[in-house]
Amino acid sequence: MLSDEIQPSDDLPRKACVITYPGKNGDEWWKSENLINQIINRAIPIFKACFPGYQALFVFDNATSHAIFSPDALIANYMNLGPAGKQEKLCSRSYFREGIGYDKDMIFSSDYHILELHREAKGLREVLREKGL
């Protein structure tokens, strides 16, 4: 609920709750994207209006929201064991080991010694090998 000092406006929703009526002639089934939109477009603006200067922590226990990842997220299940093939070309990653930061390219460079692998995805085996695992 908005505090008495907060004046509702057209760009500030009154409630974070979203009611859907899924079915053949109704709304689409609730998906992870709906949850993200609800938080970004409703819950966060309301929180910021009610508690300026504070930071919120939203916690979810919803099995379908556990599978939300960035399209280029580093997920081993989405990678081939070997190079190239039908796997996404992931963007570079940064990681820390013993307090030192490293950048990790997830595709072979254009000057890699095997011509067929230029600009191809490395695959899980190569990524682990390069990390010394």
Image (tube, rainbow, N blue to C red):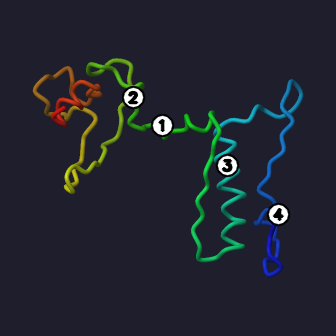
Instruction: Kindly check if marks 1 and 2 are in contact, taking CB atoms under 8 A apart as contact.
Output: yes
Across and down, in percent, residue 70 comes to 48, 41
Q: Residue furthest bottom?
A: 5
- Is the residue marked by circle 2 packed among few (<14), some (14-19), or many (20+) residues within 10 Å? some
Q: Which residue is mark 3?
A: 37
Q: Amino acid at mark 2?
A: Glu
**Between 50 and 109, the one nearer to me in the picture:** 50
Q: Nearer the viewer, residue 48 or 84?
A: 48
Residue 60 falls left or right of residue 71: right
Dot 4 corresponds to which residue?
A: 14
Assign the C terminus to one quadrant of the image. top left
Residue 80 position in % (x across, y down):
34, 20
Marks 1 and 3, the one that precedes in the sequence: 3
Q: Which residue is mark 1?
A: 71
Q: Position of residue 3 (x, y in %)?
A: 80, 75
**Residue 105, label in figure:** none
